[in-house]
Image (cartoon, rainbow, N blue to C red):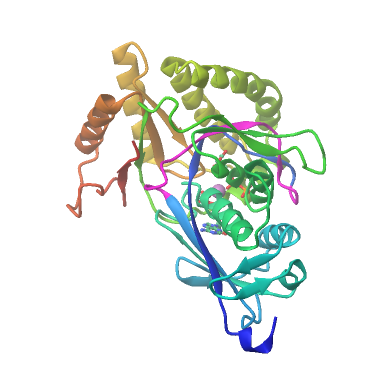
Amino acid sequence: MAEELQKWVLMVTAQTPTNIAVIKYWGKRDETLILPVNDSISVTLDPEHLCTTTTVSVSPAFDQDRMWLNGKEISLSGGRFQSCLREIRSRATDVHDKEKGIKITKKDWEKLNVHIASYNNFPTAAGLASSAAGFACLVFALAKLMNAKEDHSQLSAIARRGSGSACRSLYGGFVKWIMGKDEKGTDSLAVQLADEKHWDELVIVIAVVSSQQKETSSTTGMRDTVETSLLLQHRAKEVVPKRILKMEEAIKNRDFASFAQLACTDSNQFHAVCLDTCPPIFYMNDTSHRIISLVEKWNRAAGTPQVAYTFDAGPNAVLIARNRETAALLVQKLLFCFPPKSDADLNSFVLGDKSILKDAG
Ligand code: ADP
Ligand code: DP6
Ligand code: CO
């Protein structure tokens, strides 16, 4: 790079949606490589609703790697950010931007620093999988910037090193994270089970019960569970492998009754495993429990499931309605049972302490 070219900046912006697991990942067999104790399956949300937007830039003027999350500078010193940066840098290839007259060789990438600015359009660290959208977007944007020619499945294995659930956000539709057998983690990656057009009558409604940051991060919570819960061993070895097969069938056949039964039971078992942890972890609150009761009563009265619920590591409800008519009824029921305390806008109302209701259909 010639001295007179030192003022340039090259930038890439990417947007990645979050994903919500319907068969949960909870527990690692290797903390550094982020290798899970079981397979998991998720639904990737529509990118216009819950997503991360990340801009990565490179310039010879940058004297160190730096990152801003939602406008605040955060440290990149953690092992997870370093793993993602290292893995993509090692795959960087020549970049030639003819318009700007910039040429970066594979060798140059070893010395160049990056600046990263990321923004989540939904609550961060509140149980709506910000780490999933965040690390998937970071890895995708870095790979584009550095011209790393890896396919989505290889990028998913790199995103996994940032946050386990992130490997599933590289694909749309229904996605499975295969736990893999290799202890180096080369076969622990995500595959798409069905694309976004498959089963598009489903509507996802997210009821944000609290947008506050959770007390126990997913990483800390699952570490404690692995160390102390006996129920987790039963879940990972006996329960989830069978459930994964049934869930794949339900998705393939668009069988809502099986899908709902499996998703709700798996969410409940994940929270039971959290209770079985020492000290116990409480991710759901009273409002979450009231939402479960509402859905359970409705499904029982209807004779067949109308809505599935699932809760990640936080109190917020992810409700999956079988079609648009049911989703409209669901929103009415939620508004009736949890009347809004403010009339900010149609998409947003108070439920418990703070809430945004989003129709991701
Ligand atoms: P969540 O339920 O939101 O996924 P986690 O406890 O799993 O909560 O992860 C939260 C952490 O994920 C944050 O503290 C931050 O380190 C990381 N994270 C969140 N959003 C982003 C982002 N856009 N880019 C990079 N990392 C992010
Ligand atoms: C409950 O992927 O956030 O959302 O790998 O430690 O970053 P780390 O954890 P994370 O855990 C997600 C747990 C979950 C279930 C799921 O997404 O499968
Ligand atoms: Co997370």
- Answer with the quadrant where ligand 2 appears in the image: top right
Q: Looking at this view, is 114 or 176 the one in front?
A: 114
157 is within the stretch colored magenta: no
- Identify the residue shown where x is 57% and y is 80%: 8
Q: Is residue 113 above or below residue 31?
A: below
Question: Is residue 89 depicted above or below 4 in this figure?
Answer: above
Q: Nearer the viewer, residue 93 or 264?
A: 93
Q: In the current view of this chain or complex, which residue is farthest to the top?
A: 303
Q: Is residue 47 magenta?
A: yes
Residue occupying the far front of the picture: 98
Q: Quadrant of residue 75?
A: bottom right
Residue 204, relative to residue 299: is it above or below?
below
- x, y percentage for residue 224? 67, 45
User: In this rendering, is residue 177 above or below 48?
Assistant: above
Please give the count of numbered marks on the rendered protein.
0
Magenta span: predominant SS is loop
Residue 279 seen in this snapshot: no
Magenta part of the protein: which range?
31-50
- What residue lies at 55% left-to-right and 28% top-to-bottom? 269
Quarter that holds the C terminus: top left
Residue placed farthest to the left in the image?
A: 343
> Residue 121: horizontal and vertical position, in percent?
40, 56
Query: Residue 107: x percent and y percent?
Result: 77, 70
Q: Quadrant of the N terminus?
A: bottom right
Asked if one can make out residue 149 in the rendered structure from this viewpoint, the answer is yes
Percent coordinates x, y for residue 138 in the rendering: 58, 58
Q: Residue at x 69, y 85 (%)?
A: 2
At 17% from the left and 52% from the top, the residue drawn is 343
